[in-house]
Image (tube, rainbow, N blue to C red):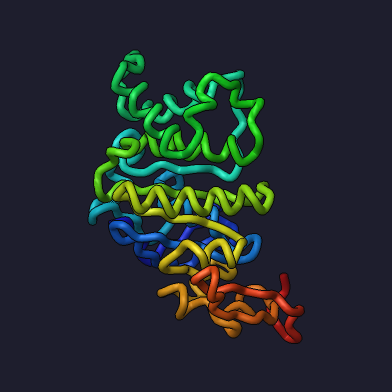
Amino acid sequence: MLRAADVQFSYDTLAQPVLRRVSVTVPAGGFVGLLGPNGSGKTTLLRCLAGTLRPTAGRVTLDDVDLGTLSRPAIARRMAVVPQETRLAFDFSVLEVAVMGRYPHLGAFEIEGPADLALAREALAATGTAHLEQRAFTTLSGGEKQRVIIAAALAQIGGTRAAAGTILLLDEPTAALDLAYQLEIASLLRDLQRRVPISIVVSTHDLNFAAGLCRTLVLLRDGEVLADGATDDVLTPGRIKALYGVEADVQRHADAGHLVVVPLRRAKGGPAA
């Protein structure tokens, strides 16, 4: 279980905190969505959960062990992050990118072996990108790149053989994708969690993307938790108004099988965007 307890974080000791007493629980097998407007602290919280930022107050624990006491390789073997954008310094192939996910499992000066290649190829197959393994990463479409980066993250935590308790954290995974690729990424994440015993945390602006995937939501506004809990309980017109300053209609869609949010208008007297 991954847990943040009363986490506070500032990028500058003299600045206002970006996060204020934020508590989040990611249970084993959970699918948690972090929602909020720009500047709400979603990405900062994701980095604290990943251990790449250390809270200035409070603590983040993995199975009740403080992340601050664990080495980066130890954390990386349990948790992998898919950033919002990935830029590579060299023209790596898709397979090479996937194999990069195995770095936390290698010793100093150790190179990848057959088992690492096998896990990378399994991860590519699981994300529907095995046929691209010889392609240069830079030649891929946005959706293909995102799938390959997810494959690298999956390879990092053990591929399709990942142990229970491993965690995938994604920062705005559909931000630069068209509608078809957004649906593909949603389907991929849903399918991955059905087949692999991982927990998933996703930071997103897309209310409908979160509604269709996440079992629990954390709503962040100005670095504080506005609400958290089961998606159907949290995603209400009143809370959307409080979070974004927007009046919205929220209904369960019969064909989609989940809540669907339709923004209607800026709310009078609502929070500034």
View extreme (front): residue: 255
Q: Is residue 234 left or right of residue 105?
A: right
Tell me if I can see residue 55 in this picture: no
Quadrant housing residue 117: top left
Which quadrant of the figure contains the N terminus?
bottom left
Q: Is 131 in front, or is 138?
A: 131
Height in image: 171 above or below 37? Answer: above
Above or below, 234 relative to 155: below
What residue is at 48 percent from the left and 77 percent from the top? Answer: 234
Q: Position of residue 172 (x, y in %)?
A: 58, 52
Q: Residue 17's spot in the image, x, y percent?
A: 54, 62
Q: Quadrant of the C terminus?
A: bottom right
Asked if residue 134 shows in the view, the reply is yes
Q: Nearer the viewer, residue 237 or 142?
A: 142
Compared across the picture, whether 241 is left or right of 216 comes to right
| Residue 176 vertical position relative to residue 95 in the rendered view, above or below | below
Q: Position of residue 177 (x, y in %)?
A: 66, 47
User: In front here: 89 or 14?
Assistant: 89
Residue drawn at 61 percent across, 77 percent down: 240
Q: Residue at x 59, y 45 (%)?
A: 84
